Each structure stands twice: as C-alpha cells, then as structure tokens.
Image: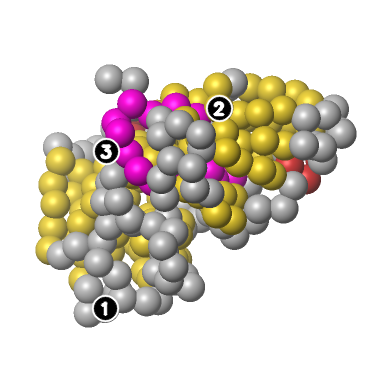
C-alpha cells in the first residue's frame, strides 16, 4: 500500500517562481490537508479539503492555492514563491475528522532563494 | 482553539533507560494522537487514544481526560527510538477535521 505520496521530495525555487506540490492517497479518504512545518513551531494548517471539489483555508493560507479535482489528489500551488515559504510541507489524509487516524506523506522540503 | 504543550522539548537518554514525554491540552477532546518523525523523514502515527492506556511493543501511551494530560512512555529505549515525538489533538469548530500539533519532543538515545 502506498498510503500518502508526495511529489517532489525536494525543490529549490527562486523568488517569484511558481510550483505545484502533488499529494496522492490510495485509501479513499474524504479529508485531505496541507501543513507546513517550521523550526520551533508545530505543524500549521495551510488548506484543507473535506471532499472532492471542495477546499477551504486553514491557519496560514496566504500565498498558497489548492485544488481537489479528484478525490485521491490534493494539489498545493505557490503562484509567486517568497523566502518566507521556505519550509517542509506535509500532506495528510484521514477517513473523517480529527478523531480518526491521520496518514502523512514523507514531506517536501522547499527552499526559496 | 486548543493549545497543546509538550515537555520536555529535548531529551537525551542512555540506551535502556525508561523515557516519558508529556502532553497537556487546554480544551476537552475526543481523541489524542501521538506521532513519530525520524530525522529527515515523514510522520507516522503511533497511537490514537481517547481513554486509558494503549501499548505497542515498547511504547505505551496513557491519557487522563479529566486532567487533560497524556504521556508517552518508551521502555528499554534504543538508539533507533531517536526521533521527534509529536502530540496532536483535533481542532474543534467548523468542519475542518484537522489536528492541532504540539511543537514536538526531540529524543536522542545514546548507545
């Protein structure tokens, strides 16, 4: 079982460039999330989706966009990367709300120079 | 919003020692998660518990709902247990369903 797969695993961007991070899950989960992890801070929610075709903002959504055209995929886009977006990004999925087990991807380490 | 506090932030132990990591939260919850993150690695779910105690191998997680406190214990610690351990609780309000995370406890077990 693949679980949750994120691509790419590493990326270096120049300020102003754009990119898309892909998250794919094969567990038929309804809920999917994008988090960022920064030194000295807990993971913070960027955007989330409670089902195919739906997305919503989390705690730190500025500078990011998302799409969930297919149930198994959740894309995170950076339209114009900034150094403040240097972080490790994690995708997660779950069958239901926070009282169900969450499954995480391996993370994407993004550096914006 | 639920606040999650973990202690200690950093922990160094000798192989074989008994380890305890603590987590406290501010708002009543229906479940609490313990997660493990190895250096440069992904995040893996260790436990999800809503009451009492759960055990998996050398890892034991306990929760006291009344005191809003949970502990993760590692018996007979081993260098391969070196990782960041993260406590998380559900976010309540709205339909988000996401988790609120502690800052993590970095554990280093020396041989």
Q: Using the image, name the chain to which the residue with label 2 belongs.
A: A
Magenta stretch, main secondary structure class: strand
Residue at 45%, 31% in the rendered image: A70
Name the residue at the bottom extreme.
B66
Residue B38: percent from left, percent from top: 43, 32
Residues in magenta, as a range: A23-36
The verdict on a common chain for dots 1 and 3 is: yes
Q: Few, some or many C-alpha atoms within 10 Å of disc 1 (few <14, some 14-19, many ≥20)?
A: few
In the image, is B18 to the left or to the right of A65? left
Residue A71 visible in this rendered orientation of the protein? yes
Residue at 59%, 21% in the rendered image: A8
B98, above or below A94, in the image: below
Residue A28 counted in the magenta span: yes
Residue at 27%, 38% in the rendered image: B77
Q: Using the image, name the chain to which the residue with label 1 belongs.
A: B
Mark number, residue B67: 1
Q: Using the image, name the chain to which the residue with label 3 belongs.
A: B
Residue position for label 3: B77
The verdict on a common chain for dots 2 and 3 is: no
- Taking depth in this image into account, of A51 and B103 the one nearest to the observer is A51
């Amino acid at each position: 079982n693949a679980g949750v797969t994120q691509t790419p695993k590493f990326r270096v961007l120049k300020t102003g460039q754009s990119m898309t991070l892909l998250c794919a899950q094969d567990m038929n989960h309804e809920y999917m999330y994008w988090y960022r992890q920064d030194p000295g801070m807990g993971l913070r929610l960027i955007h989330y989706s409670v089902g195919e075709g739906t997305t919503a903002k989390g705690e730190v959504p500025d500078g990011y966009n998302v799409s969930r055209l297919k149930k198994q995929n959740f894309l995170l886009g950076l339209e114009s990367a900034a150094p403040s977006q240097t972080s490790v990004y994690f995708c997660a999925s779950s069958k239901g709300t926070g009282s169900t087990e969450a499954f995480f991807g391996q993370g994407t380490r993004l550096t914006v120079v | 919003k639920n606040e999650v506090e973990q202690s200690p932030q950093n922990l160094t132990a000798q192989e074989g020692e008994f380890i305890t990591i603590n987590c406290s939260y501010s708002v009543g919850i229906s479940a609490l998660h313990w997660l493990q993150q190895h250096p440069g690695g992904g995040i893996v779910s260790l436990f999800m518990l809503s009451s009492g105690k759960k055990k998996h191998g050398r890892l034991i997680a306990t929760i006291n709902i009344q005191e809003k406190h949970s502990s993760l214990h590692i018996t007979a610690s081993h260098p391969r247990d070196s990782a960041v351990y993260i406590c998380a609780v559900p976010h309540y309000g709205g339909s988000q369903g996401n988790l609120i995370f502690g800052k993590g406890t970095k554990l280093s077990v020396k041989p």
